[in-house]
Amino acid sequence: MGRLSLILAIIIIIGVMINVPQVSQTVSYANVGVNKLISEHVPKKVNEMALPPARGNMSAIGKFYPNGVTLPSNPEPAQMGIADFGIGPNGPCILTTTQFEGCVLINNLQSVTSTSQGTSQCVSFQLNVVLNYDNQGSQYALWVQDVAFYNTQTNQINFENNIWNFTSPGANVTAVSGNGSLYPSGSTKFYAYGPGSIQGNFITLSLPSKFYLLVNVSTNAYGQPVIYFWYNDGYGWINYDTVTVTNAFSSSNVYFLVDGYQYAGNGLYYDAELDMVGPGDLTCADIISSNVALNLAYWNGNNFQTVINAYNSGGDTGETSNNVRSGAYYYVYTGQMIAGLHAGSGTRHWLWQENGVSLLDINTGITNGYLVVYNSSLPYSLGVQYGLQVPFINGRAELTLLPMNYSVLAYTNAGELMGEAEVTGQYGQSVTTGVTQFSISLPTQLTIYQNTYTKIGVNVNAYGNVIFNVISPPGIYAYLNQNPLHVSGTGTDVLTISVGNVPPGTYQVILNATLFNGFYKIVPITVVVQSRLVTSIFSYKTVGNGVPQSPILNLTFPNGTSTTLSLNPYTVINVPPGTIYTVQSIIQQGNVRWATPNSSTGVINSEQTINLVYFNQYLVTFSFTVQGGTGYVDPTITFYSFGQRVNETPGTYWVDYGSTYSYPQTLEGSNSEERWISNSTNGQITFPQTVNVYYQNQYFIKLVSQVPIYALINGENESLSSGWYDQGTTIYAENVTYYPSPYERYVITSITPQSFEVNSYETVVVQSKVQFFVNVVSPIPVHASINGVNTNLTPSWIDQGTQITLQNYTFYEGKLERYVILSFFPASITLNSPTTFKVNAQKQFLVSINNVSTWYPAGSTLVLNASVPFYESATFKGNYTLSPGSQIVVNGPITENLVIGPNYLFILSLVSIAVIVVLTLVLIRRK
């Protein structure tokens, strides 16, 4: 089998090569093809051929097969060729795409087919795929056939298409619009079209010959699926038919479907197949001799890629072939996988599966272009000529190839080589690589001293294994640390050049770097050998973050030559006396740098040690903003640079990593009446930044007041006190009486100014007076002299220092009642504190006895005395009727008058006595 593969591959390579157009998307195929067809070709009607499908498995309809559908396995006759059923070594899978491409290479083919009309020497090459689309909640499947009819006797070729309905058993194709028509096949209708005399159709091929079949699908502005049919047999891509599914507005999930989990609605496969079978109407082609290669590829979004899992026969078409062995082959030069079809008894089996091929994922770095991929064992000159050309878009391509070593060349569409790579394909794996322009860079002028060596970096841009070969003169030895060097984009190797005891002079060392066979770079290196060396030590350390790259040491030798080295933290060099050294003093990355304050240049005349300290620094802009006012001075900012504290005016400076910084809290120019102040003046530098400190212009407002003052400050009610206020602040002082205690208060008499905006120093003067509460405890109104003015004294607030003198007077509530002041306290004061005046007054009533009126205190006791003869009787009458000698409590005005009359009792008693005496005398006389 291996020998046969090699023979076939060589034959195929020698065969006619037809370039695939570098087309970026489906739409461009359609537009170009249709326009060309309408403007240049008038199709001629031919008899379309029915290419019906095979019989489906009705019992499998609507079922889900988690382990995958059953692949066709019946013996010949069969649909021999190449197919993808969505089955891999790990089980079923699903592939959706908008394009399938079939490639047919005929080196030799002889066949005979028995038809209803006799014997034919024709075969058909059928690119058969299943179109899926969803519409109004239902899923539909159309079987799309792009077919080439090839006469094996005359080598004539012509093209035709068919569309059948796979949605359900016996389903018809109905609502489609294209160049063709609907035809019956038994009880089923299908669509077909065969173009007439258009470019590339009905032509005779010269063997060996290659042609392509292509179908793609998109949707139009109405969401209808649109199917494009193409062929290319050496005259460019011809879009001979464009078919629209007219009853499927607003369709979704429009793509060609390969599904290993289920069968289509008619029991056939969701597969993609390229078959060499009979020329239609369920015929079988008997193959007499054959040397045919087939390749089936799908559009992966970037390029056409050979199917990953390939079976050697299809299962959907009704046409078959007999005496065909379909086996797996590959192009020796390109590694592209193909199905080789030869005459002989054949069986159905796998051509390859994903565990037996390699997937190359190539990131090209250019948007659109093409790749040339070939076997790395080929010389570059042959690889460029015979390599596999792969057009791509979106900067990427993925290929299905035989696992081996490959050289990759990336070109623009204009043919400009933009990058290369060397990559090894692995069985069953996806290998990713980029491409870059292969280049080698290193110092090409060196000065080395006898019996010493030097190491230089070799920078390589490449993808793949770079093999070095060094040619050096006797006495000079050169080698690389890694050889070969595997590089993924960029890499570095170290070239060591050792000089023995050779005479001083100029020598040449040749470095040859090979990426792949025939593709190499040659770099000549001039080596100047000198004698007598001085040892010098260069050391450095960093403060802050470590340096991102080693400092560069530049050495200029006495003979005028120079070289550069990358310093390690401790580097020993041997140089001739008089060598001038310059160490990179600054390593900068944008706004970050590492800089040394140490002297970085000098002359080496003897052994010495040069110690350097690199400070990690950030570029910082110190600025400030002032709210208003004039007369201030820019602030002095304190920070650390090179480990030293520095004072600078605002500006941009390199500041040590982790340095603190500080601004003055107030700007110079501030005084007791005006100032510029900031509340945020300190910080730490940990990244490049702009530090801006905001200074507020303020004025001092002096408050002269005996009492606390409240004010509306910018509309907010607050206490007003002497202090600093922002410029522009509005202040309205409120006239609010202040009570230090319940019986003492301060009454504001004036505020100057009372309302103002802070735009300058201001003194607010508040005039106030002290008042004390004067309480009066008295049963009668109190008369007093207040500051010489007679007035009634009542409980009230009276100014401090007021002279108050109480007046003694008798208060009459009427003619019969009065109050007589007995005492009062205090009698006279100068008011300096809260005071209570107490008045003690006696209430008196007017008492009239026998028309003699006298004032008696209320509650006093009065005795009614009278001198009356014994023969008279007397009674006091008025408010009361009392006998003389009675007592009265004075509780109000009293009037009493003594009334005198005869004492009738006394007179009666006297008469009685007289009678008794008379009677007694009479009695005596009678005796």
Image: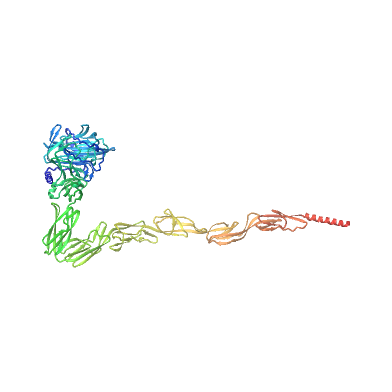
Quarter containing the N terminus: top left
For residue 288, what is the image quadrant? top left
- Name the residue nearer the viewer: 749 or 714: 714
For residue 703, what is the image quadrant? bottom left
Q: Position of residue 245 (x, y in %)?
A: 24, 36
Position of residue 3 in the picture relative to residue 615 (left or right): left
- Name the residue nearer the viewer: 542 or 643: 542
Number of numbered labels in the structure image: 0
Q: Position of residue 410 (x, y in %)?
A: 17, 48
Quarter containing the C terminus: bottom right
For residue 896, what is the image quadrant? bottom right
> What is the basis of the colouring in this image?
rainbow
Q: Position of residue 314 (x, y in %)?
A: 19, 40
Residue under the point 87% across and 56% down: 923
Above or below, comparing residue 412 to residue 169 in the picture: below
Above or below, comparing residue 1 to residue 645 in the picture: above
Above or below, comparing residue 325 to residue 509 in the picture: above
- Name the residue nearer the viewer: 76 or 19: 76
Position of residue 404 in the picture relative to residue 867 (left or right): left
- Let me know if residue 238 appears in the view: no
Residue lying furthest bottom? 606
- Let me know if residue 7 appears in the view: yes
- Name the residue nearer the viewer: 284 or 906: 284
Q: Position of residue 595 (x, y in %)?
A: 25, 61
Residue lying furthest right? 927
